[in-house]
Amino acid sequence: MESLRELYRIGPGPSSSHSLGVRNACVFYHSLYPNQQHYLVELYGSLALTGKGHMSDKVIQDYFGQDHVDVLFKRESAAHPNTMILYGLENGKRINKVTIYSIGGGAIEVEGMENIVDKNVYPQRNLSEILDYCQEKNLSLADYVYSCESDIKPYLLEIVEQMLLVVEDGLTKQGYLPGELHLQKIAKEIYQKALECNDVATKDKLFVTAYAYAAMEQSSCGEFVVTAPTLGSSGIVSALVKYYFERGKSKEELADGLAVAGVIGNVVKTNATISGAVGGCQAEIGTACAMGAAFASYLEGLDNKRIEYAAEIGMEHNLGLTCDPVGGYVQIPCIERNGVGVLRSLDAMNYAKYLGQIKDNKVSFDMVVEVMNYTGKKIPVELKETSLGGLAIEVKTE
């Protein structure tokens, strides 16, 4: 499995595959061919169908310069749901063709090129192998990460800082989100409702919901946020970082929690997908919910076995979740879905904490990842980030 640097990325919203991944593809192409007279970028599949709402064309134009690039949205299918073909243009002729796939979380794969990223930082491939290794060596999951990546802690501390900044900034913003949906930013108002609430249980839920909304509203505005594992699901783990920071956890402890959550995200990324265009929203919100459950469980002092239990619950009860963004924007149902998802992460942690004392879980995390991958292949293309079905055709933009 890859470094956690490949899972947690700081970059501009609103979408890791459609904005951050697209930008990374442009950076890669430009590194190969920096001196073209003009550039041409063709977007296929989900990138073509929802690229406008996800700001893909703006990202490309911002990178190359609006007068130096043409962007074409191609409706026909391609090898991957998020396919880009980049060319140089000289005297009207296409040259230096490179095909790049945006595979989720801001990561890219280049056709014909292998080993752009070292995939062997973590030698184990699935969670069962990792847990067996940890039991043999008497390691926590955080210890396991540091044994494989001895220099990762400072980077995770940077991620903690960025997540806190994203949430805290988002809680101060008012106005409307960009695009034709004309959605009002409401994180600040939810936070105020939390302050006014007298019921302790509801108060906590409102706080953590406000944090998730704050992160997602920042992402929707193109601010720099953190993939966890994607930008469309970035509100869940960011909200939990803020939630536990307010409950007295140190930034060092939060970084350790991110290491544990990163193991879960890496297992999904390696054995299934974290791309909504490939696997539906179960791949994004389901993975984020599992990561959040593992994060919370570690900070609550649960052992490795019950951390797995929590992560499995987080994923299992998002199976089949479709990706049908209205208007191609990462707003409806995405923002509210992150608010619901962070609450589900905490519920999964509590189930593992208490039900885990009563019985062992029959479903392993690896099993549910396999099922998620299978289910994603069965979800129709209309419900995999194409805006061709579901809420995207029922809710109209103005």
Image: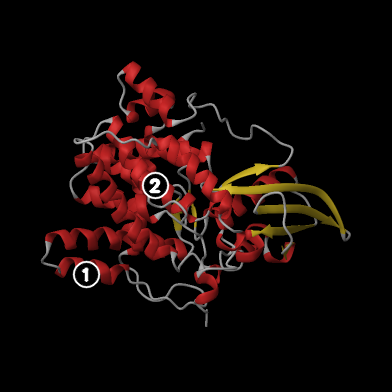
Crowd tier of the residue under label 2, counting other residues whose Cα lies within 10 Å: few below 14, some 14–19, many 20 or above: many
In depth, the one of 301 and 118 nearer the eye is 301
Label ID, residue 316: 2
Crowd tier of the residue under label 1, counting other residues whose Cα lies within 10 Å: few below 14, some 14–19, many 20 or above: some
User: In this view of the protein, can residue 155 be seen by the observer?
Assistant: no
- Classify 39 as above or below 288: below
Q: Secondary structure at mark 1?
A: helix
Label ID, residue 192: 1
Disc tally is 2
Where is residue 75 drawn, in percent x and y?
72, 64
Label ID, residue 266: none
Q: Earlier in the sequence, mark 1 or mark 2?
A: 1
The amino acid on which the numbered mark 1 sits, given as a three-letter code, is Gln
Tell me if 384 is positioned left or right of 79 in this view.
left
Where is residue 243 drawn, in percent x and y?
25, 52
User: In this view of the protein, can residue 313 be seen by the observer?
Assistant: yes
Q: Quadrant of residue 144?
A: top left
In depth, the one of 348 and 157 nearer the eye is 348
Where is residue 329 drawn, in percent x and y?
52, 68
Tell me if 352 is positioned left or right of 317 in this view.
left
Q: Quadrant of residue 353?
A: top left
- Classify 331 as above or below 152: below
Q: Residue shown at 30%/19% (left/top)?
A: 138
Q: Secondary structure at mark 2?
A: helix
Q: Residue shown at 49%/28% (left/top)?
A: 125
The amino acid on which the numbered mark 2 sits, given as a three-letter code, is Glu
Q: Residue shown at 29%/55% (left/top)?
A: 343
Q: CA distance from mark 1 to mark 2?
A: 33 Å
Q: Residue most toward the bottom?
A: 398
